[in-house]
Image: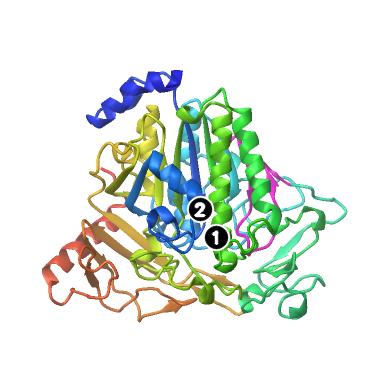
Amino acid sequence: MSRRGVLLAGAAALVAGGALPAATARRKPNIVVLYADDLGYGDLSCYGATALRTPNLDRLAARGTRFENAHSPSATCTPSRYALLTGDYAWRASGTQILPGDAPALIRPGRFTLPTMLKRAGYATGLVGKWHLGLGDGSVDWNGEIAPGPLDIGFDYGFFMPATLDRVPTVLIENRHVVNLDPADPIAVNYHTKIGDEPTGAENPDQLKFGGDPEHSDTIVNGIGRIGWMTGGRAARWHDEELSDVLLAKATAFIEQHRADPFFLYFAVNEPHVPRAPHPRFVGKSGMGPRGDAILQLDWTVGALIATLARLGITDDTLIVFSSDNGPILFDGYADHAVALAGAHRPAGPYRSGKYAIYEGGTRVPMITCWPGQVRAGHVSRAIVDHVDLVASLAALVGQALPRDGAVDSFDMLAPLLGHSDRGRDHVVEDTKLMVTTGATVASDGERILAIRVGDWKLIRGSVAPHEFHGNAIGTSPRDQLYNLAEDPGERDDLAAKLPDRARALAAWLDKIERDGRSRP
């Protein structure tokens, strides 16, 4: 066992007994949060997938704890990332829908966040990968200093995409500036009307690697139509097939630079979000088309990062938390044959629907924790946990107190995260927003839909008539719905009419959580 592991061995015993581990730990573990994008509960072989194999994530699960009741805070990306970093449910704040690439910063400077808390605890803090939480105060100047952003909410270093793979601008930002930007070729971005004379998917379909729906048919970059229009920045634009390797190299460099310090790395990878354009070494390897190949690329990336920790001799000093921002989606705007090639594969496992949905498939996600000698190895946990709990749980690990007005929905789930207890949350709130298309763009700025899960019982609050988006049933209904997830994981048998008292009790609980403005005592 490493020296840091010896010092923390007593901490693990205290956690098992319910005490605060920071009282014993003199050295703090490195923390790596690996956040996948649109990965479903059933997409990994350690979660039952048989159509493809994910050996590196399987090994991570075998060496750590795998969760069967882990939830992302929302069924879409921006709100889940907001909740993970702040400890607050995103539905409490305005503007927390899926953001365009030119949106202002959602998390304002001075806000209590996961990276600010860890920075106060002596951590070097880094972000690599997808951001998608807005930048600047309004209109972003892509050609100058970009602020506020990640560096203003606790990150010491950032190498990141402004939004998503399918949204402009398709450039990378290091700290406060676009990487490789030629001042003679300035960037302009617009999400309302076409700018410049660059080819678009709508006007030049012959230039596309694969087709897209109207929302994904704006400026063509690297043979792929995007959401939104951009001009300039040609030397700065990423190459989709190489992007995962670029991000991995930056994550590796951050770890190498801070190997002697406790570090926190938020590594937000892109797979298997659209557009799926994996590196050629993965193309055709899954037999399931680009989506399956992207999952293999994700698994390889995780393996490469773990190998870096081993090479540096810090595996035993590092807590890894792996999960996904929301459930899966097959067709999400591009004609990459994901639906046809899925075959018998069930990306959400036994759960209904996926991304965008208030059904379990929208937020029930794979989650694995690993820290040799500290996290229980080979354990499968039934504890109900949520990514919003990472702030409070990691604060407990490193001995930091939470402010009364910060992380208001984050519960200390450290013992379950270490695999020392299967007693998790008594409830979890699930969230989504209806998607609205305008013909030029797409955004989740429709009605907010909430659900509450208490043990095996789940109530979906009544809202609007049933909707679908990109083939996924959203789960809406004008009336409250009640499901017993133990007997009906697919949420097909609505029991609200048969058990009105239980439905009313859960509805009242959800109302109180919303009304109180917090759920943490």
* Amino acid type of the residue that numbered disc 2 sits on in the rendered structure: Ala
Q: Position of residue 492 (x, y in %)?
A: 27, 75
Magenta stretch: includes residue 79: no
Question: Dot 2 corresponds to which residue?
Answer: 36
Disc on the earlier residue, 2 or 1: 2
The secondary structure that dominates the magenta segment is loop
Question: Dot 1 corresponds to which residue?
Answer: 272
Q: Is residue 393 above or below residue 207?
A: above
Q: Is residue 56 visible?
A: yes
Relative horizontal placement of residue 55, taking residue 159 as reference (left or right)? left
* Amino acid type of the residue that numbered disc 1 sits on in the rendered structure: Pro
Q: Secondary structure at mark 1?
A: loop
| Disc 2 + disc 1, Cβ < 8 Å | yes
* Residue 14 in which image quadrant: top left
Structural distance between the alpha carbons of marks 2 and 1: 8 Å
Residue appearing at x 72%, y 76% in the figure: 201
Quarter of the image for the N terminus: give it: top left
Q: Which residues are magenta?
A: 155-178
Q: Position of residue 171 (x, y in %)?
A: 71, 54
Residue closer to the observer: 278 or 11: 278
- How did the renderer colour the structure? rainbow
Relative horizontal placement of residue 186, taking residue 122 as reference (left or right)? right
Residue appearing at x 55%, y 33% in the figure: 309
